[in-house]
């Protein structure tokens, strides 16, 4: 009788893989796959490793071991990035029962991926995507489970993820524990804090066991850039949330209004003006000086801050979290006829992406 399989796969090259890096190792013991410490599972890579193991078992049992040994490097069939991984260790093997278990594990992982892709179609945010695109995005999502009465988000915490409810229900509560809303399967939350940079404005608590998919802000930015048509879905969602939670602010926008960036940061303020197709000027009193942003029918046509102009000035303003702003609906004839600096969503996403890159460094 043979022994259980003990093997190792090592990543030897990484080209923008969203999950793993060069040097990460995957260890096989029996049919169990042990991931690099602290790293989430990628169903694409796990399935591919399982298929390699099954092929190796079949080749060895058929007496083709020497031929199989020649191939020890593989490319991940993955998603947005590319990795090359190597079969670096192959110590001892298995029984016919183990081959069956490994094959079953591979089939199980394929079925789980299909189930997750089907589930993603229940979210309005993903309904316009084809299966290949859903597989791509799936590799960026992390599954997490919570017991009943667990807190998923604390009010005042920074927003780091867009969260999709796969099963169960959660309650949105105020400081006194009063339930403001109930969210269930197919709904999402976390987008306002993630997009605006403001802390989470309410506590989210599970009413019953809950399973969620989590997408980091950095991955969301990459996805919106790669799939531009998703920007419209995301924009509509933001506008809906703003109208639900900021009705009084929206009403003020008919002529003029002012406020503090601590309450309404630049990204959220500019988004409101764009979606309401406003024409006017935002004057900002910021820590590093005064700034001006002119809108013509929702498009940004002029930006000035310090010695900067255009997109560079816009990006610097997005970084500011303190200061005061005033919006007035007056606009000069020259500004009314000026062309947009760039498409608004591109301008905004490029600025937020640069901020993320600077924070990573």
Image (cartoon, rainbow, N blue to C red):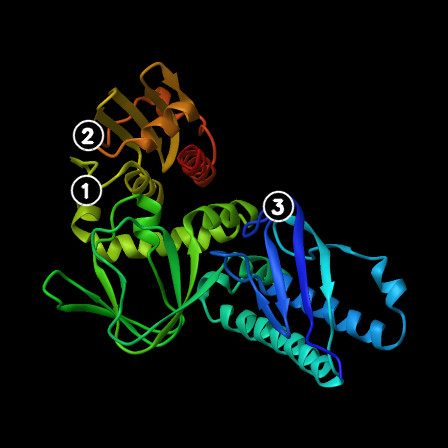
Element on which disc 1 rests: loop
Residue at 28 percent of width and 76 percent of height: 148
Residue 355 lies, in percent from the top left, at 40, 34
Is residue 74 visible from the viewing direction of this image? yes
**Image quarter of residue 299:** top left
**Image quarter of residue 322:** top left
Residue 322 numbered tag:
none
**Image quarter of residue 333:** top left
Element on which disc 3 rests: loop
Question: In this view of the protein, which residue sits in the foreground, 268 or 101?
Answer: 101
Residue 95 lies, in percent from the top left, at 74, 82
Residue to which mark 3 is pinned:
22
Which quarter of the rendered picture does the C terminus lie within? Answer: top left
| Mark 3 crowdedness (10 Å alpha carbons): few <14, some 14-19, many ≥20 | some
Residue at mark 2 to residue at mark 3: CA–CA distance: 43 Å
In the rendered view, does 141 fall on the left or right side of 21? left
Residue to which mark 2 is pinned:
323
Residue at mark 3 to residue at mark 1: CA–CA distance: 42 Å
| Mark 1 crowdedness (10 Å alpha carbons): few <14, some 14-19, many ≥20 | few
Question: In this view of the protein, which residue sits in the foreground, 119 or 357?
Answer: 357
Residue to which mark 1 is pinned:
263
Residue at 55 percent of width and 75 percent of height: 115
């Amino acid at each position: 009788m043979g022994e259980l399989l003990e093997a190792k796969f090592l990543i030897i090259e990484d080209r923008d893989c969203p999950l793993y890096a060069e040097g990460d190792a995957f260890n096989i013991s029996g049919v169990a796959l042990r991931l690099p410490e602290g790293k989430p599972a990628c169903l694409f890579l796990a399935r591919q490793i399982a298929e390699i193991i099954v092929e190796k078992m079949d080749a060895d049992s058929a007496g083709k071991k020497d031929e199989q040994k020649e191939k020890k490097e593989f490319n991940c069939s993955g998603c947005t990035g590319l990795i090359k991984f190597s079969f670096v260790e192959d110590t001892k093997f298995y029984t016919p029962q183990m081959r069956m278990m490994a094959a079953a594990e591979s089939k199980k992982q394929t079925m789980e991926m299909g189930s997750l892709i089907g589930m993603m179609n229940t979210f309005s945010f993903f309904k316009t995507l084809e299966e290949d695109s859903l597989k791509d995005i799936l590799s960026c999502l992390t599954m997490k489970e919570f017991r009943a009465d667990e807190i998923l988000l604390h009010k005042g915490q920074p927003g780091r993820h867009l969260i999709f409810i796969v099963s169960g229900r959660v309650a949105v509560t105020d400081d006194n524990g009063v339930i403001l809303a109930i969210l269930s399967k197919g709904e999402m939350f976390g987008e306002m804090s993630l997009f605006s940079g403001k802390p989470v404005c309410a506590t989210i608590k599970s009413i019953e066991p809950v399973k969620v998919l989590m997408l980091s802000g950095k991955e969301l930015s990459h996805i919106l850039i790669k799939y531009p048509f998703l920007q419209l879905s995301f924009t509509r969602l933001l506008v809906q949330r703003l109208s639900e939670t900021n009705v009084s602010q929206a009403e003020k926008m008919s002529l003029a209004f002012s406020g503090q960036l601590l309450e309404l940061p630049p990204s959220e303020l500019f988004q409101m003006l764009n979606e309401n197709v406003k024409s006017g000027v935002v004057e900002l009193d910021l820590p590093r000086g005064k700034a001006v942003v002119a809108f013509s029918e929702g498009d940004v046509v002029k930006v000035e801050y310090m010695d900067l102009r255009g997109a560079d000035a816009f990006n610097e303003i997005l970084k500011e979290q303190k200061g005061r702003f005033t919006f007035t609906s007056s606009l000069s004839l020259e500004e009314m006829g000026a062309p947009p600096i760039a498409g608004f969503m591109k301008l905004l996403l490029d600025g937020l992406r640069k901020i993320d890159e600077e924070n990573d460094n």
